[in-house]
Amino acid sequence: MEIGKGKILIPDRIAQGDVIRVQAVVQHPMDTGFFRDANANMIPPYFMKDVTVTYGEAEVARFEWTSGVSKDPMIAFPLRADREAPLIFTYKDNRGTSYQISVPIAFQTG
Amino acid sequence: MDEQIEPGRRAFLQVVGAAGAALMLEGIRGAARPLAARVVRGPDEPEAPNEEVAKILKDRFGDRTIQRGHVTLDMAASTEDGRFVPVSLESDLPMSAERYVKGVYFIIDHNPDPLVFAMHLTPQIGPLAVQTRVKMRRTSWIRAIVETSDGELWADYAKVETSLNGCG
């Protein structure tokens, strides 16, 4: 696992004004802090806790997460694709580390 | 006002199922009393919030009423693996600049941390349809509550059984 790596899936062809489905997956163990490792040591809580989604300059969504979100968190939601701009997910985990994944929203021409 | 209209397949099936069961009973008893008297509390109503859930509801929503409707929480009635429980959540509420869903709150009553996730949204997000995966410690009622930009609260509920503890 490479923590913080991930991808954002969007449709191949997007026309201006489409409501598209955005699906983002990021690699993270999302440890709850309640499990033990093979040596019976507690595995401390370690999870993505804050996600912001920006589209161009605008913040369009923000998520509060807990360790109750499954390992390698996936979230899918609709987005009004009304301009060409990067869609950026910024994940912050409970240790304060930030990770960014982005995809350009671009319209089909011709 | 349209909040009396109960959306959703589950609600429909519940009513049909309850009526069917009641009719069977009537047949057995041969009595003829109104059906409605016994269809008071369906299997679709969540249990009373536990202390922790009540605190979350109070902190996030104060004393505002949470009405049922305009949200459809689609989850399997039972799941084997509490580590990966698929969630699908939809709403027919508008997502326009004037009025939109500004918050989504997903609560699993019997999880160690019941407010599993919250979403803060803008009208740039289209008509609400969210999919994700969550963990469950044990069988629990689940609450999907949405908050509109003008302060209304709408919800749907589901009871999901699980055998494998996904939370530790």
Image (cartoon, coloured by chain):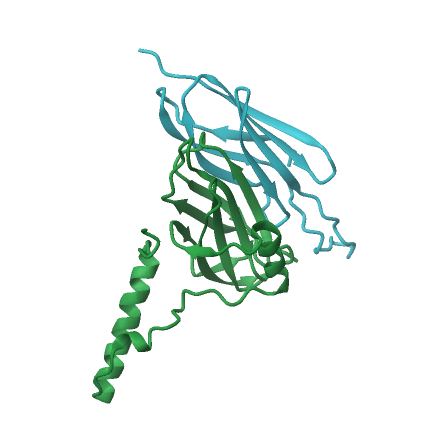
Query: Which quadrant of the structure image shows residue B68?
Result: bottom left
The residue depicted at 70 percent of the width and 56 percent of the height is A34
| Nearer to us in this view, B161 or B55 | B55
Q: Image quadrant for the N terminus of chain A?
A: top right
* Number of numbered tags placed on the structure image: 0
Percent x, y of residue A24: 51, 34
Classify residue B5 as left or right of residue B115: left
- Rendering coords of residue A64 (x, y %): 60, 42
Q: Quadrant of the C terminus of chain A?
A: top left
Q: Is residue B133 above or below residue B163?
A: above
x, y percent for residue B103: 51, 42
Q: Position of residue B152 (x, y in %)?
A: 46, 48
Q: Colour of chain B?
A: green
Looking at this view, is B77 or B89 the one in front?
B89
The answer to whether residue A3 shows anywhere in this view is: no
Image colour assigned to chain A: cyan
Residue farthest toward the top in the current orientation of the protein:
A110
Residue A101 lies in quadrant: top right
Residue found at x 50% / y 56%: B143
Residue at the location (37% across, 29% down)? Answer: A19
Q: Is residue B20 visible?
A: yes
**Closer to the camera in the image, B135 or B30:** B30
Q: Residue at x 62, y 27 (%)?
A: A100
